[in-house]
Structure formats: structure tokens, C-alpha cells
Image: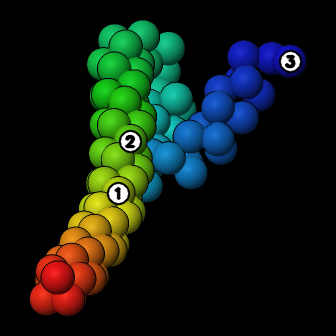
Amino acid sequence: MSQANQRTDDQAAAQDELPKDLVELAIMIAKLPNEHREVLEPAVNKVIENSRRRRRIYTLVQEALSQLRLDMKYLMFDLEATRRERDQYKSDAGGSQDED
């Protein structure tokens, strides 16, 4: 596969995870003459990598928050069940003490 085809495939895959304007910038830089492209490509590649890293971190944080919300729901359910069990135990213990 030629380098131009590889670059096009990479850009197509990156479009799903990169902002549209960043993808457009990378395409425009790829079309520049070689002397200008060599100067700009390293900087754009760093920006693209940082954008991907931020996207991954953002996704991880969203997943962690979703899991935390679910855990909190389970904890609240467990707390309410424990309180009901405690109240039931107290009412049962209170009723048996009255019989003595």
C-alpha cells in the first residue's frame, strides 16, 4: 500500500474520533507542497494524538461516572433494605418483649 493510500485510510478512520475541523486541517496540510508539509505535519500529528487521548480519557470518565451512578443506586437500595430489616427486627423484638 502506498503512503498516500495509507494516509487516506488513516484519515478516514480518524474522522470517527476527531473533530471535523481537525480532520479538514490534516487533509489540507497533506495537500501542501512537501517542504511546507514537513514543517507542519509533526505539529498537526501532536494535536491529533492529543485529541485522541482526550477523547479516550473523556470516554473513560463517562464510563466511570455511569458505573458510579449504578453503584450508588445499588447502595441506596441496599441501605433501604437494611433499614427495613432493622425496623422489622425492632418491631419483632419489641413485640416479643411485651409478651414476657
User: Residue drawn at (33%, 37%), measured in percent from left and top?
Assistant: 57
Tag 1 secondary structure: helix
Q: Which residue occupies the foreground of this view, 9 or 59?
A: 59
Is 93 left or right of 51, judged from the image as shown?
left
| Quarter that holds the C terminus | bottom left
Q: Distance between the residues labelled 1 and 3?
A: 48 Å
Identity, as a three-letter code, of the amino acid under mark 2 = Leu
Q: Which residue occupies the foreground of this view, 66 or 27?
A: 66
Q: Which of marks 1 and 3 is nearer the N terminus?
A: 3
Q: Which mark is residue 23?
A: none
Which residue bears the numbered disc 2?
60
Snapshot quadrant of residue 48: top left
Is any atom of residue 59 visible in this view? Answer: yes
Which residue bears the numbered disc 3?
1
Q: Which of marks 2 and 1 is nearer the N terminus?
A: 2
Q: Which residue occupies the foreground of this view, 57 or 64?
A: 64
Kindly indicate whether the residue at mark 1 contacts the one at mark 2 (C-beta within 8 angstroms): no
Q: Which of marks 2 and 3 is nearer the N terminus?
A: 3
Residue 27 in the image: state x and y as whole percent: 51, 39
Residue 84 in the image: state x and y as whole percent: 27, 80
Snapshot quadrant of residue 66: bottom left
Q: Vertical placement of 95 versus 46: above or below?
A: below
Residue 31 in the image: state x and y as whole percent: 53, 32
Q: Give the number of the mark in front: 2 or 1.
A: 1
Q: Vertical placement of 18 versus 38: above or below?
A: below
Identity, as a three-letter code, of the amino acid under mark 3 = Met
| Quarter that holds the N terminus | top right
